[in-house]
Image: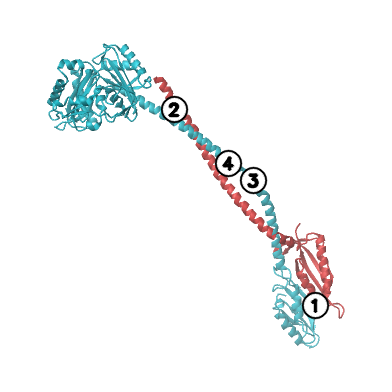
Amino acid sequence: MSDRPALGLQIGDSWLQMARVDVRGVVVESYGQIRFKEGIVVKGEIKDKAKLTEVIRMLMNQVKPRGVRMGEEVVLGISEDQVFWREFSIPLTDGKQLAEVVETKIKSFLPSLPGEVETDWEVVGENASGEIEILMVAVSKLVINAYMEVVKMAGLKVVIVEPMVMGSVRVLEEKSLLGKNQVFLYIGSGYGEFVYVTSGRVRISNWWSSKEVEKQGGLKKMLTSFITYVNSKHPEKQVKEILVSGEVGDLAGFASGLKQLGLPVAVGQPKVKQSAVGGVNGLQTVVGLSLATISKGKKINLLPDEIQVRDEVRKVKSIWLWGSIVLVILSIFLLAGLWWWDGVIISDLTGLGYVREQLKAEQEDDVGEIETKVSQLNSLVGQLDTGLAVSGGEEKVLTELVGAIPEGVRTTSVLYERGAGSKERLASSQADWAITGTADSRNLVLSFYRRLTKKQTFMGGRLYFGSLEKDQQVTFRIVSNGE
Amino acid sequence: MENKQKKTIMVILGFLVLILVIGGWLVSRVKKNLGLMTGLKRETEQLQEKTVSLKNLTESYQVYEPSVFEWEKWFPRTEEEVAKFASEAEKLAADSGVILEVDFDDFPEMVEVGGEKMKGLKIEWTLKGDYPELVKFLGGLEKMKYLVQVNKIFLTKGKQINTKLDMTIEGILLMKDL
């Protein structure tokens, strides 16, 4: 069963109706009706399955505007002639426990019912004692199976089987039902129904044909009897209003005729206000049947449990199957995405690899060249530094010596030598040197010595006289401290 | 119907297993390639940084390149360049009024200069001149664009009276390795 509207299928004793509403449940999208000869269905019981199948197929082709496709989901309305109703109450319970209690109670009724039956139930209210009121609906399995077989042979799929009256009430606007105890009078084509409804919940239903009305002495008399019966069964929920609905053209006129019964009479307002096809109004039972799959709340469904379970299993399997297919498709997309991403990465890797190789090749040339140049530069600068540090200073040696020699002093030899392992210029404190000479007097030698040793190049020198006895042609020697 | 459903389920399960296997393989492949990509990116970035450094170094070197050319001239490499140095020294001597007699070793050798091993050619020059002339020569020698480590200066009086002084210079002319 889906959340889409199903095709409503109502089978009477001499007529057949099909209708479908739109997804919002406000427009009758398709409708069809066909009459067939009497005897095929009698008081809701199928007497000739083959003929009925044929009639259904004929109607499927005649439904306007486009016919009915094979395999469509159907909500089947069963004639009240074949429905057994029973009201009972149970102490206030809830949830799963409620279902168990109700099922137990229903089982206790089964021996009193004719043959095997399909049952379903719904909560319809609460009585003055605070107990929960339950409506049980039962239909013979033979009847249900016969309907199922016929519909299946016609090529349709039944998703809900319910009493027709449920469809008759479902089409009405909720505001005309809520909080009211009403007798709902539905006038159909050659038949009618009295239904006792509290807050829109069906409690008692009485189906009759036009012929029976005559036998019973008229509609008003029958209705009065029904109301009397209902009030006796439900003294705390007496009927307060008569609600008229159905396929009669002048419902308002019909309703005014009932006012003499002493109760307010209202005309039912349909939920479905428009129709895309002719010959149908929004109050018809078959429209209510079509609304079943999209209406909220628990509803009576006499479809055999095993079929309901099988449908549910099929639905779960279908969901699983489609989910798996979607998963597979998504996974394939994911794989394709991964494959594409991998391709992009490989492409990037190739590009980067090429850039890396290019950079490496460039650098190999550049690095080799620049390293050689820089190495040469460093070596050159190093040599230059070292060379500049140790060269020069010779002029200073001679200049300072010449500047210190006074008139009357004559050098005979001058030796100025770089100290061992010296990292400085020639003229330095590490140098070894020696000066020999002659002078006209000792004083001149002393004067020379003083002037000489004041010079940076000759600092710390020591004086030796060749002979101190004579004061003329004095010989002397001045040497560095380390000499 | 049941068999068909089972078959469908088996096919879908098979697909899912296949997808899982391929997906696992692809994920590991992508992971591996991403790792390679990260490594390669880092390496390329380092290479690009190195390229920039090299460019900067090259530009810096270009600033010094003309000087390198000049500085290299300070170190004679060949006998021809040594001869040029000798000629310049002789010209300096002549300009200074000094009589110069140059003497070079036959071959350069590795010598210790300022604590480092460098290629050098030993020289022993004899000069004749008075003090001012010798001072002028030595001053000129210092200014020459050659590097001469003078190890010894020896001055003696001329052998004849009123003659000029004799000076001997021993040293090393610094050369460039070829």
Numbered tag placed on residue A358 in the rendering:
3
x and y percentages locating residue A237 in the rendered image: 15, 30
Say whether residue B55 is visible: yes
Q: How far apart are marks 3 and 4 (CA)?
A: 14 Å
Crowdedness near tag 4: few (<14), some (14–19) or many (≥20) residues, C-alpha within 10 Å: some
User: Which residue is tagged 4?
Assistant: A349
Q: How far apart are marks 1 and 2 (CA)?
A: 112 Å
Give the mark toward the camera: 4 or 1.
Answer: 4
Q: Nearer the viewer, residue A186 or B148?
A: A186
Verify CB contact (< 8 Å) between mark 2 and mark 4: no
- Chain identifier of the residue bearing label 3 in the image: A
Q: How far apart are marks 2 and 4 (CA)?
A: 36 Å
User: Which residue is tagged 2?
Assistant: B13
The quadrant the C terminus of chain A occupies is bottom right
| Colour applied to chain B | red
Residue that lies at the very extreme toward the right in this rendered image: B160
Say whether residue A378 is visible: no
Q: Distance between the residues labelled 3 and 1?
A: 66 Å
Q: Which of B109 and A21 is in front in this view?
A: A21
Give the chain coloured cyan.
A
The amino acid beneath tag 4 is: Leu
Q: Nearer the viewer, residue A316 or A296?
A: A296
Q: In the picture provided, is A216 more to the left or to the right than A375?
A: left
